[in-house]
Amino acid sequence: LPRPPPPGGGPPAVELMLPSAEGLPALPRGAEPPLYSIRERLTELQELLEQLPRLAAEASGDAAASAGAVSLEAAVEVARAIVTAAASSGDLFVLSVSGAAQSRKLPSAHAAPQPPDGKELAAQLERCTRPESEALKRIARGCADANLAVRLVAAPGSGFVDVASLAQLPKISGGRLFYVPPDQDGARPAGAALEEALSEGLSVSHAAVDAVLRLRTSQGLRVVGLRPLSGMGPDPEGEDGAGDDSIVLLPSVDRAATFAAELRHTDDKKALPAKTAYVQSALLYSGPAGERRIRVSTREIPVADSFRSLAQSVNPPVAIALIAKLALAAAETKPLSAVREQLKDSLLDSIVSQRELCPPPMRKTADELVLFRPLALFPLLTLALSTMPPLNTPSLASAAGPRSPDSLAAFAHGFRLLPTHLACLALAPRLLVVHERSLGDGWAPVEGAEAPPLADAALAAEEAPDEGAAAATLAPSAATREQLLPRGSEVSPSSVLLLDTLQELSLWVGAQASPAFLEQLFGTPRPADGADLLPEGANSAVDRMHSLLATLRSQRPSHAPLTVLVHGSPSEERFFSRLFANAYEPFLLQLLSDQRSRL
């Protein structure tokens, strides 16, 4: 997908690389024109998509999988060579049904000659969520140097494809990863999800490419460790910053890009000379038409002269979003238990430090937790972060399930792409009450206003007033009551609930929900896991559901699939595992116990 667009306007051209019968990449035949419009190759593309189940089945053998993986890396290298030779830039769209070369294999609980014990098996599963392919990292750095962003759709037919290593290609090159797990039977990539991923992958646009970001400060301060946190840009542990902590090079930037840096005193023994300091960011980039632009922003920040004024300035949601992204980065190199323990220790350090804000008699009382009001949300948000799927041990129950290593690696990659306000909301999923039989056979009535504002929509509007106004509230036809801090023990079997984790929408159907209402949604009073909604226009109840889903999906940067989970099925753990409020009281009691040794 070349960029900028061809001179003279017109639709962007696409060079389509299709695998031959042997599964090796082959350039389209014919010298004229050198780039084909995708509309001219739709027939061949459709034929390829129809062959996906067969290709996926063939990729299940070790030899076939290895050949397919070599094809993936070879295709990326060929595209990089083309872009480098043409001294241009572009986006490489890759659809892979196998994985990386020399992909790791999932550990087995029944491995011969001696099966691993539980602890060893958990450690092996955790390792499968960390990137280990140096070859892919090297290729990704080459793509970043050539201004070639990789958009990778990983659509395995079955099993494990090492998404953690594959994600290095889009992460380092500034592209996107789209993971499409197999369907419920594990036999092939889910058709609807694959269609969404292909459509979204081909339509992603970049507001800026070939960018350089520099951060400067006023006298007395210096910048340490400027890094992108949105998943777009070079590896922060590498040397892409040209040896300067205040500069970062970025293949592409969009409006959701997030950055973080630490400001330190140039001299720890000297106070800053003024009550305010200044931070200036300068972003040099190429616009959509290839023109070079620069955007400069200078901000005044207050200088805190006491611990109290410092604590009052903290924004807990923004702080926890930063902590979450740093924790996910740490999880790529450290055991998950160590990452969770570090989160807990940092929280405990904060709680103990806040005693300095108390009157002297209260500074050593160990039998109560004392929280400064602006920081009171940190225990709850830290618990939410600690229970987030990517920071917990994967499951071996299904190689493609929601807690499989591949799914968790894809979750972590997607989370790091979220803008700050959505990252915080993803930590504490929202539970929408669609139906409660005790209140009637239809949609649950909305309490209060007819169209209550959505928390994430309001934040999105604040971030982007040009786009948020239309999405700040649900339309009356889609307004839904919300249950705050839901507990698994409070879920009624006579209800239908929609859990919004931002990256996924889970519709839980209680066993005692109204059969008439279920008939309106699914066309049957007894839907099963993975059931499809009736099409829009079938009746007013399902129309309202489609309206709600469309509104929720419009407020996030990528498509969120809908998963239907039925009460009593083994898969419902996918729903209940995100309702963490039950663990809040035990978590606080443990903090209280740990606090005693610190005080």
Image (cartoon, grey):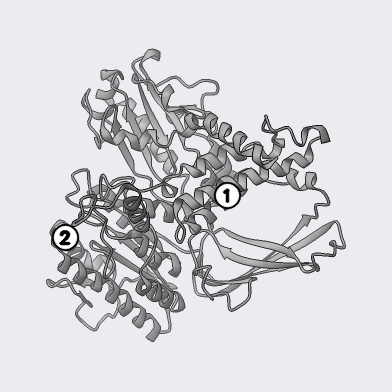
Q: Quadrant of the C terminus?
A: top right
Residue bearing the label numbered 2: 60
Please give the name of the residue rendered at 31% of the width and 49% of the height, measured from the top-left corner: 404
Residue 18 pos. (x, y %):
21, 70
Quarter of the image for residue 149 reads bottom left
Please give the name of the residue rendered at 33% of the width and 71% of the height, measured from the top-left corner: 13
Q: Closer to the camera, 547 or 167?
A: 167
From the image, state whether disc 1 or disc 2 is nearer to you: 2
Mark 1, residues whose alpha carbon is within 10 Å: few (<14), some, or many (≥20)? few
Residue type, numbered disc 2: Ser
Residue type, numbered disc 1: Asp
Quarter of the image for residue 507 reads top left
First reached walking from the N terminus: tag 1 or tag 2: 2
Left or right: 537 in relation to 303: left
Q: Which mark is residue 466?
A: 1
Q: Are marks 1 and 2 in contact (CB under 8 Å)?
A: no
Mark 2, residues whose alpha carbon is within 10 Å: few (<14), some, or many (≥20)? some
Number of numbered callouts drawn? 2
Left or right: 303 in relation to 8: right
Please give the name of the residue rendered at 27% of the width and 80% of the height, measured from the top-left corner: 33
Residue 372 pos. (x, y %):
72, 37
Q: In the displayed structure, would residue 282 be above or below residue 307?
A: below
Q: Closer to the camera, 332 or 239?
A: 332
Residue 512 pos. (x, y %):
29, 18
